[in-house]
Image (cartoon, rainbow, N blue to C red):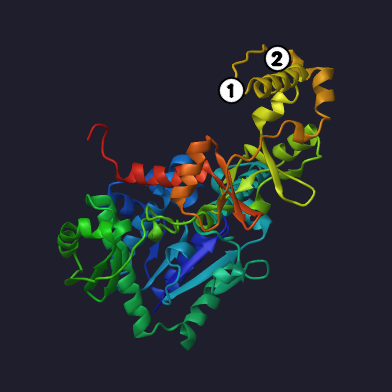
Amino acid sequence: MPIISISRGSHSGGAQLAQLLHERLGWRVVSQEIVGEAAHLYGVSVEEVTRGLDMPANFFERISHRKQRYILACQATLGELFPDGNGIYHGLAGQFLFQGLCNVLKVRLRAPMDFRIAQTVAAHGMTREEAVRHIDEVDLRRAKWGRQMFGIDWNDPDLYDLVVNLEQMTVDGAADLIAEALERGDYKPTPRCVEEFRNFTLERRIRAELFFNSPFNPDVVNIRVDGGRVMLGGGTAFEQSRNGIVSFVQGLPGVDEVRVETGADVLVGRDLGTGLSSRDTTACDVMMPADRYPRVPEWASIRETIVALGASSVLLDDGYLLPPRYVLVEDAEGRLAGVVSRRELLKGLVPQLQKAEKSRRAIREIAGFGGDMPTEISIQWNSLFSHGAVAAAGDPVRTVMAPVKGTVKVTDSLSTVITTMIHHGVDLIPVLEGDKVVGVVLMTNIFDIVAQFIIEHGGPAGT
């Protein structure tokens, strides 16, 4: 029989439904104890795993991918918790923990807001207003978590096999409906599904053991499981630790035989879904499409550009919102004319500073001086709130924008990207396809990739 995964909003009757199904089917119910099991087996705290499964990532978790590791720890315990392939799971991230397995009936339970409010008030002793605020906060947090971790909306009905709405049905009726559905031939797992589940849990356990309990990096290993036979492979990084990895995996419970596959090419981070590696990929792999980054025409005023910058938040692929530091400036034909930063915009609000800049450029041209000329102008804080600043904000942004110092092509390697950034001292590089800007690469993207590797692979300072 399959595993039933119950996904629900906070206080939507999921625990009650799981208990009723347990009474009808006799299967084990698993929820929060999987968190404790994972924490015990892999040496991480219950609080860490709970946060990893329920909270949007903070900065360190984004660059180190610790949250995916906590999911891995929980997945690795599934075989221990459901050894016969039968069970009921409700709670944290069930639809994701079992994603892709054919012996899992994924149920989405929806409940009316009044039902959820009453449950929340009873559980936490809140007022109605506090309960509404609590439900909204939890729903928003989980929606952001789903976007960050998997790039999906956890309310999407396509993620589930069955969506049950308690608007017209009791929780008891929902349990009857699910139990009856399991009797249909459609939901009886085939031997192939059972074997797939066992292979999945062993592969997850091997990968978790490598990460939590070994000196080896699981991201350089391609792992395939067929029964108790384990096939390992990888690129150069795997070959460097091949003997140690093979020996470690051979000693794990459930592994009968280990074989090494040649010619397998594994990218660092591929298993985590990052899609990037230390192997040289291209600008196209890391660029942000140009239409997702703020831009203005060159005749827009400084004030309009400030408004555009303040109203923009760059949505990264993992759902993280990044405040932009630059605005792209385009000419009448839509070609990139320049880039303006917050610093240039502030300088544009100080007329005497603008005049000094023009004088300095003129002197440099007359004297043939090629480098930067030192200049020091005292800027009064209150001058930024003066009528002169307001008037200066009406000037076109082209008067303060900086020229584009460097660009790369979509096919240029990341070696070219990072070299261009460092050579020109810029944190943003436009990516061209022909003469059209199709995207931008931010130093944030480049730094996060490198930081992930250094954090996860580096030892203590001085080693």
Amino acid type at image mark 2: Trp
Q: Is residue 204 above or below residue 24?
A: above
Marking on residue 372:
1
Image coordinates of residue 75 in percent, x first then y, are: 36, 61
Image coordinates of residue 86 in percent, x first then y, are: 36, 73
Q: Is residue 239 above or below residue 121?
A: below
Q: Which residue is mark 2?
A: 381
Looking at the rendering, in which quadrant would you find the N terminus?
A: bottom left
- Secondary structure beneath disc 2? helix
Local packing at callout 1 (Cα closer than 10 Å; few below 14, some 14-19, many 20+) is: few
Looking at the rendering, in which quadrant would you find the C terminus?
A: top left
Q: Is residue 328 visible?
A: no
Tell us which disc is closer to us: 2 or 1. 1
Give left or right: position of 399 versus 240.
Answer: right
Residue farthest toward the bottom in the current orientation of the protein: 185
- Secondary structure beneath disc 1? loop
- 23 or 462, nearer to the observer: 462
Give left or right: position of 388 versus 152.
Answer: right
- 29 or 3, nearer to the observer: 3
Local packing at callout 2 (Cα closer than 10 Å; few below 14, some 14-19, many 20+) is: few
Q: Is residue 38 above or below residue 362?
A: below
